[in-house]
Amino acid sequence: MVSEYTPDYKIINKDSGADITAKLREFIVKITIKESSASANDTLSISIDAAGIDIFPLSGTKIECHLGYKETGLINFGVYKVDTKSVSGPPEIITVICGASDFNAAYKSQKSRHWDDKTLGGILRIVAASNGLELVIDDELAAIQIKYMVQKQESDMNFVARLATEYAANGTIKAGHIYFKKGNGFYKTVNRSKLGLINYHLQWIDKPKYDYVVATWQDINSSTSNEEIYDGEGFSLEYSGSVARVQEISQSQYEARKNAKAFWHKLEKMKLSGSMMMKGDPTIVSGLGFKLSEFGDTFDGRVVEVKNTTHTWQRNGYTTNAVLSTGD
């Protein structure tokens, strides 16, 4: 973001539909939004001068927060429910903590059900609709045909996360939507250099490198065991090199190949971590991939995932801190 841009925000009382930004403007000292790939943990904190507490929405009220810049527009960070309030001083400041409201009790409660001959998109649409959410999914993922899928004593939240792992996708909930996007688990990938960073820390840890992942599957019509051998780009008939094996025995060739790919991506996502502090950028959110450049040979060309972010607006500016990881 260019430094001469003017940081701005908007706050809407979703219960009444009123834009309450103008009423709160003189009292708000700080706004902090913490969002992560574990979307249920998203929080909004608003610190206000104690003189303005009487006009702040009551506990249980749903509020929507937008952050960004006057010159380039604001981005909706979703709806939160007013949960708790604390006071500190001097000067006396009230901090209001709000939790993500996209997650109702049903989404977190365990349930059991199954699907026969459905597409992945069809299954996820049912899950989304049953929780009052809308689904945004890549066409390629939506079209995947699934003969049989079981959700046994598992919450919808965990079920969506499991499907994302199995299909090397990113499955998150933001602003009333389930986003299920392909691309090595990233919502999208953008180039990231040192330009515009306030500070950064990157760490590389060498892990065992495998040449192949092998998944075993059992033919239900015979006692024959089969192996699917994946090298990161495609499947082979044989291997010569270091091997990592999927412990689970698959029930079909399709399932074995799916599990081999998912395990490969999991192994690859274990080496690089770090953080970056930058001028406030509301487009930096969890699930985004950074393709690194200008950080040295160890890091350049690698892609790291934004696992969570902290967006902080204060009267003297706006910053974004991104925690990076290639692991779960």
Image (cartoon, grey):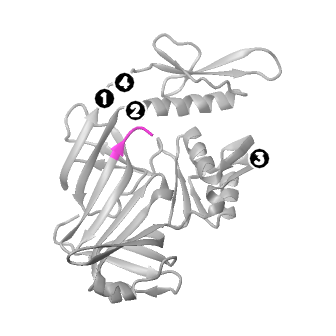
Q: What's the amino acid at mark 4? A: Lys
**Residues at discs 2 and 1 in contact (Cβ within 8 Å):** yes
**Residues at discs 1 and 4 in contact (Cβ within 8 Å):** yes
Residue matched to label 1: 205
Cα–Cα gap, marks 3 and 1: 40 Å
Q: Nearer the viewer, residue 127 or 188?
A: 127
Q: Secondary structure at mark 4?
A: loop
- Say if 168 sits above or below 16 in the image: above
Do we see residue 210 in this rendering? yes
Q: Nearer the viewer, residue 222 or 43?
A: 43
Q: What's the amino acid at mark 2? A: Met
Residue matched to label 3: 114
Q: Secondary structure at mark 1?
A: loop
Cα–Cα gap, marks 2 and 1: 8 Å
Q: Residue furthest top?
A: 240
Do we see residue 70 in this rendering? no
Main SS of the magenta segment? Answer: loop
Q: Residues within 10 Å of mark 3 (few under 14, many from 20)?
A: few
